[in-house]
């Protein structure tokens, strides 16, 4: 039995902090020391709990695995409060007068929850709002979200419930501020659904790991409660509106309804830029610029809102133009005589739209026979029963539109820029693609797989047999496909592991730059993506690590033995004096290579060489619209030492084509 002896100590600190909290935003030295002492004590207690729970074989909420690590939901809920206090201290984020007291309150909440778990052995969920946590597959960090249950919530209820997913606006809310905003809020009077407010790793418009956070929070609440996945609504305002546009348009068959208040949908209009960026940045804008995805409104019930005095009303009007262009529905609500917020009347209408379509829900499996779907990348490649596995040309408009003949059972597809498709066999008996003769669907591949693969060859579309299908699933084709399409930043949306070289570097100057690059990545990811990067030595990498994670390799072929072992299978040449790529050579004492490529030892994962995220602190500080890929798939950087580290300029950068090769003009 765990003996918890910190409660009286914590209560004393809380009473002291209430009496002595400084008027200034920063806590006094005594207050900060007390806070550090309390956080350290709570962290030690959590470590004890982890050990005891691992051995007692009892349930502590729901159990799941992140890699080989077993996680309990109750432990994550405790840990997220402690992490909030730790991050406040490490980043000196006492930005408001109330932050110190809010931090102490978060620790008190952890104290209360722990005592509850000791008495009940499992968390008790109440009507209204409470703070939950989960451990992310991205970096094994614990991340918060707020859970709200309706006033009539019955924990013994066996039927599935609808879910609302709410995205917050930009405003620098750290974990402590997020917890303070959502703890112990009463449920809405008309709330009949479970609601989660997503943290999204603060302010990134739900891009990169912020996007992953949304789906991991949904997965976590679905572990705890019976969620009806045909009745999930997504909405947000301002930055949350931008996130709703992004996630709603890129995953159109995930949501019963979507609502975007204000926000932005593209870089050039929002930033008032007229000069086109270089191709290696311009083309990847099509990953997140939702204005290109208007056709997907055909597949999701969507409402958008803007105040008539809000400059971000332009976003709604731009998307209305796209809806009219493609002849697809979009509900537009404009608030009267108001700026960047809802009017009560408009908010009511907005929520009525979301509720009405949430109750209707998504079509039952296998989905609607008619879809109209567009993408520009295999990253966002699925709409109901159709998956675009590979594109002819990356970052070009890629579409699938379908029709169905009830009398013959024939599904007809019209495609553009599609190279390889997979189609659920349950949607039709036969399929015709681009007016070609029908091919079998329901009975294809011996009827043994849930989806059937179709590849476009010179002679036309052909269907994979069972063996070809299994080979593609296990080995791929060597071409760009879902979650293996780049750019560099894509590696940091799922599990990644930084690998530090321990050998003798070929160049001391280059090694110093890679060491700084790794340090900067860790520092910026910690601050702006709210997690600690995991670092291992090259001698410590196991097959299990290589199976589960993208490998981010730092060093050169002399210092990093994994990089050395893979070098012959990479589209570069590297010796002690220079790096050769794209037909040109660059001296290593002044140049470094940043690159993403499929791992030659695991075709389902990436390697990245000498790069973290390519968006840096100035981008995060400026605007979420600047959080687009800066270096494409591969780049050569000129580096020079400064008093503050290094200054970098991009000497050359490019995007690999769909075959993971540089175009001939670049070689």
Image (tube, rainbow, N blue to C red):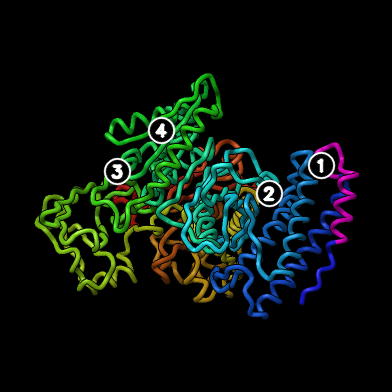
Residue underneath mark 4: 276
**What kind of element bears circle 1?**
loop
Q: Residue 591, can we see it?
A: no
Label 3–label 4 contact, CB within 8 A: no
Q: Residue 264, can we see it?
A: yes
Q: Quadrant of residue 460?
A: bottom left
Numbered disc in front, either 3 or 4: 3
Give the Cα distance between marks 2 and 4. Answer: 45 Å
Query: Sequence order check: which comes first, mark 1 or mark 2?
Result: 1
Q: Position of residue 544 (x, y in %)?
A: 51, 75
Q: Where is residue 501 in the image (x, y as percent from the top left)?
A: 58, 67
Give the Cα distance between marks 3 and 4. Answer: 18 Å
Query: Sequence order check: which comes first, mark 2 or mark 4?
Result: 2
Query: Sequence order check: which comes first, mark 1 or mark 3?
Result: 1
Q: Residue at x 34, y 57 (%)?
A: 480
Give the Cα distance between marks 4 and 1. Answer: 43 Å
Label 1–label 2 contact, CB within 8 A: no
Q: Where is residue 345 in the image (x, y as percent from the top left)?
A: 51, 27
**What kind of element bears circle 4?**
loop
Residue underneath mark 3: 397
Residue underneath mark 1: 26
Query: Sequence order check: which comes first, mark 3 or mark 2?
Result: 2
Q: Which mark is residue 183?
A: 2
**What kind of element bears circle 2?**
loop
Q: Residue at x 64, y 56 (%)?
A: 126
- Above or below 529: residue 159: below
């Amino acid at each position: 039995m765990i003996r918890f002896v910190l409660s009286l100590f914590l209560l004393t600190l809380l009473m002291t902090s209430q009496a002595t909290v400084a008027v200034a935003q920063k806590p006094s030295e005594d207050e900060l020391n007390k806070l550090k002492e309390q956080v350290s004590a709570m962290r030690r207690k959590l470590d004890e709990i982890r050990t005891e729970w691992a051995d007692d074989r009892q349930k502590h909420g729901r159990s799941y695995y992140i890699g080989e690590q077993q996680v309990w939901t109750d432990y994550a809920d405790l840990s997220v409060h402690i992490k909030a206090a730790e991050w406040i201290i490490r980043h000196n984020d006492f930005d408001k007068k109330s932050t110190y007291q809010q931090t102490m309150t978060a620790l008190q909440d952890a104290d209360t929850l722990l005592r509850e778990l000791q008495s009940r052995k499992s968390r008790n969920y109440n009507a209204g709002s409470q703070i939950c946590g989960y451990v992310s597959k991205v970096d094994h960090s614990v991340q918060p979200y707020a859970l709200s249950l309706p006033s009539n919530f019955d924990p013994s209820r066996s039927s599935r419930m609808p879910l609302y997913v709410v995205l917050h606006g930009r405003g620098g809310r750290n974990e402590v501020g997020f917890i303070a905003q959502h703890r112990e809020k009463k449920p809405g009077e008309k709330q009949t659904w479970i609601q989660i407010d997503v943290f999204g790793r603060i302010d990134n418009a739900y891009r990169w790991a912020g996007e992953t956070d949304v789906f991991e929070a949904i997965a976590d609440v679905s572990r705890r409660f019976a969620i009806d996945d045909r009745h999930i609504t997504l909405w947000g305002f301002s930055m949350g509106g931008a996130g709703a546009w992004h996630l709603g348009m890129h995953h159109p068959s995930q949501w019963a309804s979507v609502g975007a208040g204000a926000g932005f949908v593209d870089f050039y209009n929002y930033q008032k830029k007229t000069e086109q960026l270089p191709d290696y940045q311009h083309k990847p804008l099509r990953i997140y610029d939702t204005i290109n995805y208007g056709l997907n409104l055909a597949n999701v019930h969507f409402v958008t809102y803007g105040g008539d005095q809000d400059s971000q009303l332009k976003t709604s009007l731009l998307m209305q133009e796209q809806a009219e262009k493609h002849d697809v529905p979009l509900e537009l609500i404009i608030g009267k005589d108001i700026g960047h917020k809802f009017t009560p009347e408009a908010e009511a209408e907005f929520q009525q739209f979301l509720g009405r379509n949430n109750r209707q829900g998504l079509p039952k499996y296998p989905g609607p026979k008619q879809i109209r779907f567009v993408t520009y990348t295999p990253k966002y490649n699925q709409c109901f029963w159709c998956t675009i596995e590979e594109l002819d040309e990356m970052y070009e408009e890629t579409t699938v539109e379908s029709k169905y003949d009830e009398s013959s059972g024939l599904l007809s597809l019209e495609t553009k820029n599609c190279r390889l498709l997979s189609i659920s066999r349950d949607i039709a008996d036969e399929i015709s693609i681009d007016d070609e003769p029908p091919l079998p669907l329901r009975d294809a591949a011996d009827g043994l797989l849930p989806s059937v693969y179709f590849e476009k060859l010179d002679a036309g579309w052909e269907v994979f047999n069972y063996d070809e299908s299994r080979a593609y699933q296990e080995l791929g084709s060597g071409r760009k496909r879902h979650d293996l399409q780049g750019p560099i930043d894509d590696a940091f949306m799922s599990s990644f592991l930084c690998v530090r070289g321990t050998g003798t570097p070929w160049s001391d100057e280059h090694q110093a730059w890679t060491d700084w690059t790794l340090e900067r990545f860790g520092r910026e990811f910690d601050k702006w993506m709210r997690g600690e990067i995991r670092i291992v030595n090259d001698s410590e990498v196991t097959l299990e690590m290589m199976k589960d994670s993208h490998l981010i390799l730092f060093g050169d072929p002399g210092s990093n033995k994994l990089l050395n072992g893979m070098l012959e299978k990479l589209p570069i040449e590297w010796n002690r004096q220079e790096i050769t790529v794209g037909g040109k050579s660059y001296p290593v004492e002044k140049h470094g290579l940043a690159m993403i490529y499929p791992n030659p030892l695991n075709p389902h994962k990436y390697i990245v060489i000498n790069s973290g995220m390519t968006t840096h602190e100035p981008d995060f500080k400026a605007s979420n619209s600047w959080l687009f890929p800066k270096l494409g798939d591969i780049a050569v950087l000129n580096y020079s030492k400064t008093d503050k580290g290094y200054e970098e300029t991009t000497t050359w950068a490019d995007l690999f084509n769909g075959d993971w090769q540089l175009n001939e003009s670049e070689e």
